[in-house]
DNA sequence: TCTTGATGCGAACACTGTATGCATCGAGAG
DNA sequence: CTCTCGATGCATACAGTGTTCGCATCAAGA
């Protein structure tokens, strides 16, 4: 028996072998981060919580990712890959193609409500492979419709800005909804008194609220989005007709 | 002389009288928060740093504000007050009025780049007095142009979504620029190699970059915004004409 | 003069992102 | 087989965060 009380390294205390679980990797980290964000929202993502989900220590992630900022850039580019940009086909069908593209982008943003929050911070400054690929395809789409490259670029930016802008306000609401644990009806019922009071001196807002209050909220949002999208497409169309 | 070494309360050690400086208040806190955000950006805002700027302790703020979230809601509504929504006038002049409104909103977002970041998190869920007032005025504007209340509401949402969406990506870039301490030319020169490489396999993106690279970035952004805005207005004009 | 409700704030708690240094591993070299 | 070495995992530590709690201090009213 040793005189000193140094902790004796024991076979039993030894940590399990490394390779009993799949090794950490950039891809695995990013994939798990997306899952965590989808399930628990943006502020639930910390290096510690992500590490735990991967059966790893928080600081282990730093071997594969420069830091949280880089992780978020990777994660955003990852979900950009889910967007579907139609191939440029019949020029006459550009309007439907552009609409499909917008709806696809919107679907992605609503599937991952945290994206809208993150875009405001990280921005599109980082040119990930998915973003560049999708952008190139969108440019091709607008070009095939008859736009010059210059106008195609502006049209693309306009469309993205609109979809992201709509996504920002919707996503914030959806995040609150998701974390409230309530059904949308319950949440709205709770919010209603404060809302009624806030708009009581504003007849137009008040009437608008009242009209919308008992309709299906998801459908209202969908109609709202489609309405604006159609106006932009109208605008592009008059532009195409010189 | 006391035997124990308890710190003897001394007249000299006494804290200065409370009212030698203006008392803390919600308004003063919000105003200083806006100043801090404008000068140092979103992540420089902490309850401690804000308290210090007000010659107060961090926790003192909690007497006037429920927490950081509420503070941010107040701050966002505060800057909404800077937006100028034209009075509904000549129905024929609705297009210019709507454009003025959009430019005013855009100016506000670019003056306070942190707003775009915050909208993604706080959302427009909180109906502050300024937001409700401005919304009511925008509805009036679109109604006077000939839209039904229902369509006026959709038009307003579309316009806001577009401006905010454009603001999101620009503001993120502007924040990076502001904190880099470099001139925009310097910053872009540093970013250029990586950007060139990222788009090397995408001919349309590459050509677009090249065309824009040596122009005044501010003007490029302005043109981009105006282009989309005009398409939006075109779309609504064709809608108004049935 | 005494009381009372409002206000400021120091200390503490549970978090966060991340730098550092050490333990451990797998695979290749001799 | 043994030895070595770069890659990988991670415990510890640090500075900074939002927020709670309880105490000290104040201005004003009774």
Image (cartoon, coloured by chain):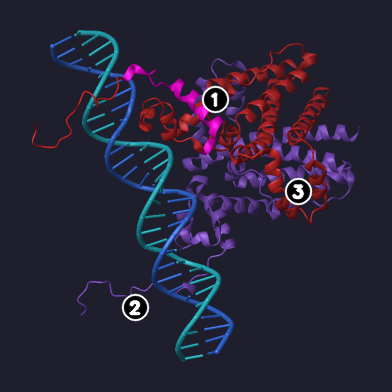
Chain colours: A purple, B red, C blue, D cyan
Host chain of mark 1: B
User: Is residue B9 positioned above or below B194 on the image?
Assistant: above
Identify the residue at the far right of this view: A242
**What is the quadrant of the N terminus of chain B in the image?**
top left
Disc 1 to disc 2, how far (Cα)? 62 Å
Q: Position of residue B82 (x, y in %)?
A: 60, 21
Q: Which residues are magenta?
A: B18-43
- x, y percentage for residue A141? 82, 47
Percent from the top left, x then y, of residue A212? Answer: 61, 28
Q: What residue is disc 1 on?
A: B77
Find disc 3 in the rendering and name its residue: A135
Tell me if residue A172 is in the magenta stretch: no
Q: Quadrant of residue A203?
A: top right
Q: In this image, A171 relative to B194: left or right?
A: left
Q: Secondary structure at mark 3?
A: helix
Location of mark 2 (residue): A11
Badge 2 and badge 3 both on one subunit: yes
Between the residue at mark 1 and the residue at mark 3, the CA separation in whole angstroms equals 34 Å
**What is the chain letter for disc 3?**
A
Given residues B40 and B129, the one toward you in this image is B40
Residue at mark 2: chain: A
Vertical arrangement, residue B207 with respect to residue A221, above or below: below
Residue A27 in view in this figure: yes
Q: Nearer the viewer, residue B46 or A86?
A: B46
Residue B25, magenta (yes or no)? yes
- Report the Cα–Cα distance between label 2 and label 3: 55 Å
């Amino acid at each position: 028996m040793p005189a000193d009380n140094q902790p004796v390294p024991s076979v039993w205390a030894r940590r399990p072998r490394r390779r009993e679980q799949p090794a950490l990797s950039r891809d695995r980290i990013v994939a798990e981060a997306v899952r965590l964000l989808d399930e628990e929202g943006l502020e639930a993502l910390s290096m510690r919580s992500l590490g735990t989900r991967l059966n790893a220590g928080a600081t282990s992630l730093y071997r594969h990712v420069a830091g949280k900022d880089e992780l978020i850039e990777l994660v955003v580019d990852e979900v950009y890959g889910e967007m579907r940009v139609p191939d440029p086909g019949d020029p006459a069908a550009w309007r439907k193609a552009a609409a499909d593209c917008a709806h696809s982008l919107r679907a992605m943003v609503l599937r991952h409500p945290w994206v809208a929050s993150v875009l405001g911070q990280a921005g599109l400054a980082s040119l990930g492979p998915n973003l560049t690929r999708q952008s190139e395809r969108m440019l091709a789409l607008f070009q095939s419709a008859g736009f010059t490259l210059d106008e195609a670029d502006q049209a693309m930016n306009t469309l993205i800005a609109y979809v992201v802008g709509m996504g920002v306000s919707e996503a914030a609401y959806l995040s609150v909804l998701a974390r409230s644990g309530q059904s949308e009806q319950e949440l709205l019922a709770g919010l209603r008194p404060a809302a009624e009071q806030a708009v009581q001196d504003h007849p137009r807002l008040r009437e608008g609220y009242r009209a919308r209050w008992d309709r299906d909220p998801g459908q209202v949002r969908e109609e709202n989005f489609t309405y604006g999208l159609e106006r932009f497409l109208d605008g592009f169309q008059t532009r195409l007709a010189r």
